Image (tube, helix red, strand yellow):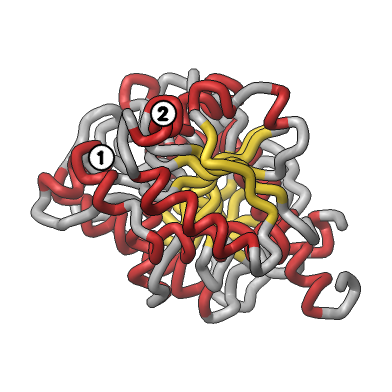
């Protein structure tokens, strides 16, 4: 399935205006694209950053239902106004609501069928919270916007997919959050979306333990015995192909990964350091469990690189390719071309 079959444009939010998100969008604009993209951002911000970077390009206003350009040197823009001027590398709390508005417009557009999906450049969670707006991340924001009870964060790079049972929680709260209900929901979403978005008929999933050595038979914690193992056993009776719980320090080795389609880690910093070591700069953050397609870059706002021309667009390209492929697969499935 090729990305060219995706008729609707993808929405690309430019993220934190003081960060490298606008730079990445402009780098994208200088290249020919295989599928249409609409950047959701303040057009004036993009103009200012283009001048700073010494780039000459056409920023074309876009409205729902219109074509979006794929041509090098041009970019379709759905413009939303900032609240305050922007200096590259310098955060401004007044623009926090603007950043969230770009996410809302892109997400609602995808829900309404105006976009094939959405791709997000990085936001700065700290400045949004400093502005008095409770915000724990794109994943949770889009969960609330779409009105779904559970979503799953999964990062993917060549040869490895890592999903998370918990996301942005303090480490002291993780154990209490690992419940049979949560694990069941997460594994159902992970398995279902591997089938739905990636065409994997019978996903093989490795599940990590929570504790060192997966609890060492209860000597280093009982979460594996009391929660994780019984949950996996129940899901295996429904046909799930699950291996684990495995010690996280040996799970990420060729012996196990060679036969796996995805890994489920129990918490953020258990699984993601391995994935980012393997593929940083070319990895994709994918939100599973949403009624829309959403992918993102694997890095932060990199304020020190904003406006310098040294930002690397590799992860953005990977996120766009992943969203295009997922949208194309969904389109083919809807038309009955895949079973």
User: Looking at the figure, which quarter contains the C terminus?
Assistant: bottom right
Secondary structure beneath label 1: loop
Report whether residue 16 is seen: no
Q: Residue at x 45, y 68 (%)?
A: 107
Residue 36 or residue 117, whichever sits in front = 117
Q: Which residue is drawn at 47% across and 33% down?
A: 271
Residue 143 or residue 235, whichever sits in front = 235
For residue 77, above or below residue 224 = below
Percent from the top left, x then y, of residue 109? Answer: 50, 73
Residue topped by disc 1: 86
Residue topped by disc 2: 216
Residue 116 or residue 279, whichever sits in front = 279
Q: Residues within 10 Å of mark 2 (few under 14, many from 20)?
A: some
Q: Which residue is drawn at 27% across and 57% down?
A: 98
- First in residue order: circle 1 vs circle 2: 1
Residue at the extreme right of the image, as rendered: 337
- Left or right? Give the position of 234 relative to 105: right
- Left or right? Give the position of 212 relative to 185: left
Q: Quadrant of residue 88?
A: top left
- Distance between the alpha carbons at the discs numbered 1 and 2: 53 Å
Q: Which residue is drawn at 52% across and 41% down?
A: 245
For residue 112, above or below residue 138 = below
For residue 216, above or below residue 76 = above
- Left or right? Give the position of 155 relative to 196: left
Percent from the top left, x then y, of residue 117? Answer: 59, 63
Secondary structure beneath label 2: helix
């Amino acid at each position: 399935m090729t990305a060219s079959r995706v008729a609707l444009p993808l929405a690309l939010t430019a993220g934190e205006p003081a960060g490298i998100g606008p730079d990445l969008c402009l780098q994208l604009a200088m290249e020919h694209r295989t599928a249409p993209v609409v950047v959701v951002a303040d057009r004036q911000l993009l103009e200012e950053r283009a001048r700073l970077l010494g780039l000459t390009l056409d920023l074309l206003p876009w409205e729902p239902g219109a074509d979006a350009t794929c041509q090098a040197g041009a970019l379709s823009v759905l413009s939303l106004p900032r609240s305050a001027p922007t200096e590259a590398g310098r955060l401004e709390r007044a623009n926090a609501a603007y950043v969230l508005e770009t996410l809302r417009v892109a997400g609602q557009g995808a829900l309404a069928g105006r976009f094939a999906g959405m791709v997000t450049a990085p936001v700065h969670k700290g400045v949004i919270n400093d502005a008095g707006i409770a915000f724990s991340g794109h994943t949770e924001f889009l969960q609330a916007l779409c009105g779904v009870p559970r979503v799953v964060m999964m990062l993917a790079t060549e040869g490895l997919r890592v999903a998370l049972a918990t996301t942005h929680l303090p480490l002291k709260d993780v154990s209490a959050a690992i419940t049979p209900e949560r694990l069941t929901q997460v594994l159902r979403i992970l398995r279902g979306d591997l089938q739905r978005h990636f065409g994997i008929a019978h996903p093989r999933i490795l599940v990590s333990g929570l504790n060192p050595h997966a609890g060492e038979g209860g000597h280093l914690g009982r979460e594996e015995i009391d929660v994780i193992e019984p949950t996996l056993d129940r899901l295996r009776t429904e046909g799930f192909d699950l291996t684990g719980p495995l010690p996280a320090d040996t799970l990420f080795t060729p012996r196990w990964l060679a036969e796996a389609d995805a890994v489920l880690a129990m918490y953020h910093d258990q699984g993601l350091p391995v994935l980012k070591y393997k593929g940083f700069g070319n990895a994709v953050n994918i939100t599973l469990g949403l009624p829309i397609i959403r992918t993102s870059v694997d890095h932060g706002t990199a304020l020190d690189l904003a406006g310098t021309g040294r930002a690397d667009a590799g992860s953005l390209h990977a996120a766009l390719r992943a969203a295009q492929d997922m949208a194309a697969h969904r389109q083919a499935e809807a038309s009955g071309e895949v079973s």
